[in-house]
């Protein structure tokens, strides 16, 4: 067993002991993004979660849209694929990668959350996603913001690097998918890391929340940080497959 496979077999086994997603905010944000896409469709759609891990995002999609989606998952770790199958029995989950599993029918929507940064050949990964999407299909992707990679693990020792950590900036992510996809939107979320790097702003944020109406003001400031400054720790990207690519 390779070091990479050993890592994920152990990780998914440990994290499966939780009764909720370890990354609740990310799962919610992905679910909200998918909701907007599915509401624009008039009939049930085929959804593939690439690198579905323990199945938390599949579970969120099933919870929101159980009668509007046909769910599929693919996960390199056999442990993760098994856990996902048990968590979401309605989903067709297999162990493998897009390079090793063949799908006879293409998908309306592909989701891949916190996966691409752990892929060695990211360009091939983007091409493999395009190959399984319908020409009017959509990709919903999240990944850590490459602008924060330098020094991240040294300054956050509670987080252990995974075997591969190829973080991308927004510009790099957009360029990677530009040949076969058109970017619908790219924005960041989770601004807490940004505030940790700027103690004065962090203090002002906490102080604002304590005053009447401060929670609303803080939310507006946070949205400015992650939408306008693009200073959130994570990126949410939505790409539409180009019809003629």
Image (cartoon, helix red, strand yellow):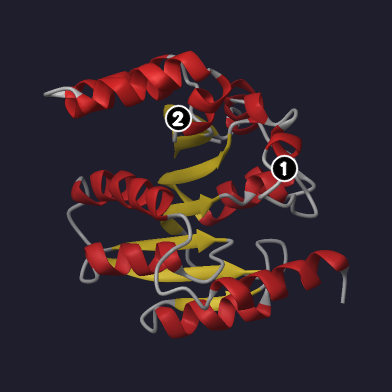
- What is the quadrant of residue 90 in the picture? bottom left
Extreme left residue here?
A: 212
For the residues bearing labels 2 and 1, Cβ distance under 8 angstroms: no
Horizontal side of 12 relative to 41 (left or right) equals right
Query: Is 149 rendered above or below residue 104?
Result: above
Q: How many marks?
A: 2
Give the residue at mark 2: 191
Residue at screen point 51% across, 19% down: 199
Which of the image's four quarters has the C terminus? top right
Query: Is 211 rendered above or below residue 63?
Result: above
Query: Is 241 rendered above or below residue 73?
Result: above
Extreme right residue here?
A: 2
Give the residue at mark 1: 122
Say which of marks 2 and 1 sits in front. Answer: 2
Disc 2 from disc 1: Cα separation? 26 Å
Residue at screen point 40% across, 61% down: 47
Residue at screen point 40% across, 74% down: 19
> In this rendering, does residue 241 appear at all?
no
- What is the quadrant of residue 204 in the picture? top left
Query: Is 196 rendered above or below residue 158?
Result: above
- What is the quadrant of residue 201 in the picture? top left
Q: Position of residue 122 (x, y in %)?
A: 72, 42
């Amino acid at each position: 067993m390779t070091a990479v496979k050993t890592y994920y077999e152990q990780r998914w086994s440990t994290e499966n002991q939780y009764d909720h997603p370890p990354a609740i905010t990310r799962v919610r944000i992905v679910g909200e993004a998918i909701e907007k896409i599915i509401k624009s469709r008039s009939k049930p759609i085929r959804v593939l979660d690439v690198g579905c891990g323990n199945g938390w995002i599949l579970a969120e999609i099933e919870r929101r849209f159980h009668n509007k989606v046909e769910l599929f998952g693919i996960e390199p770790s056999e442990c993760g694929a098994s856990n996902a199958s048990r968590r979401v029995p309605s989903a067709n989950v297999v162990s493998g990668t897009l390079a090793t599993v063949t799908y006879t029918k293409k998908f309306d929507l592909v989701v891949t959350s916190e996966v691409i940064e752990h892929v060695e050949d990211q360009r091939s990964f983007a091409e493999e996603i395009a190959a399984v999407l319908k020409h009017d299909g959509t990709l919903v992707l999240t990944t850590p913001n490459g602008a924060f990679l330098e020094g991240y693990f040294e300054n956050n020792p509670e987080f252990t690097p995974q075997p591969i950590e190829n973080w991308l900036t927004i510009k790099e992510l957009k360029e990677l998918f530009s040949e076969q996809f058109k970017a619908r939107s790219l924005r960041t979320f989770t601004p807490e890391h940004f505030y940790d790097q700027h103690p004065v702003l962090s203090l002002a944020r906490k102080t604002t929340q304590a005053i009447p109406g401060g929670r609303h003001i803080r939310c507006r400031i946070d949205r400015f940080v992650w939408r306008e400054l693009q200073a959130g720790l994570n990126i949410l990207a939505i790409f539409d497959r180009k019809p003629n690519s």
